[in-house]
């Protein structure tokens, strides 16, 4: 799993939460990632030049976008924060209260309608990307991020 976030605090939090779940690479930005994996510097390849089999989901926090299969979608702040939250522990079921606290940053509130509406919009965008990543409802509890093809969520931040 690869996580890209400029925040050192967020990288530490991800390392603590994902310890032992999967191999984890934490980087501050895409340039650092390219250096680590040996991609020569230069302009990024055009979306059409990316291999169509690359179906991992990559979240670019700096640009507030999500990419998969060479396609990219813009995310609102709330959509980004929800997706980033869900990717920190992809198989964990997040309660409505936890999601509300993480996305809207207000304590003691649990407005299910807010969360459900945001999930609906984000599901539509993930579907547009054509990724196998989906937000699944767990009745009476909340939501979790799953990959119906294989667990390859590769970025968060």
Image (spheres, rainbow, N blue to C red):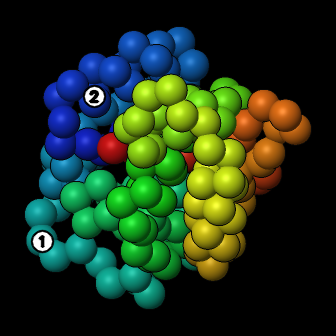
Identify which residue is drawn at 48% across, 20% down: 18
Give the side of residue 148 with respect to residue 44, left or right. right
Q: Is residue 82 above or below residue 7?
A: below
Residue 11's disc number: 2
Give the side of residue 1 with respect to residue 7, left or right. right
Question: How many residues crowd around disc 1 within 10 Å: few (fewer than 14), some, or many (20 or more)?
Answer: few
Q: Is residue 26 above or below residue 117?
A: above
Q: Along the line of sight, which residue is nearer the eye, 141 or 59?
A: 141
Identify which residue is drawn at 18% across, 36% down: 7
- The mark that comes first in sequence, 2 or 1, is 2
Question: How many residues crowd around disc 2 within 10 Å: few (fewer than 14), some, or many (20 or more)?
Answer: many
Residue 111's disc number: none
Q: Which residue is mark 1?
A: 42
Q: Is residue 134 above or below residue 2?
A: below
The x, y position of residue 24, in whole percent, is 42, 27
Q: Along the line of sight, which residue is nearer the eye, 119 or 91?
A: 119
- Name the quadrant containing residue 39: bottom left
The x, y position of residue 1, in whole percent, is 48, 36
């Amino acid at each position: 799993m690869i996580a890209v976030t400029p925040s050192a605090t967020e990288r530490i939090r991800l390392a603590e939460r994902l310890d032992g779940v999967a191999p984890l690479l934490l980087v501050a930005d895409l340039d650092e990632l390219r250096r680590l994996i040996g991609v020569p510097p230069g302009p990024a390849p055009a979306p059409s030049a990316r291999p169509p089999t690359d179906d991992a989901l990559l979240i670019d926090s700096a640009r507030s976008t999500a990419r998969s299969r060479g396609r990219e979608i813009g995310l609102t702040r709330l959509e980004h924060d929800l997706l980033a939250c869900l990717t920190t522990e992809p198989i964990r079921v997040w309660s409505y209260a936890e999601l509300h606290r993480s996305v809207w940053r207000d304590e003691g509130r649990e407005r299910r309608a807010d969360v459900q509406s945001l999930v609906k919009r984000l599901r539509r965008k993930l579907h547009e990307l054509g990724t196998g990543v989906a937000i699944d409802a767990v009745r009476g509890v909340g939501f979790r991020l799953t990959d119906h093809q294989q667990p390859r969520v590769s970025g968060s931040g």
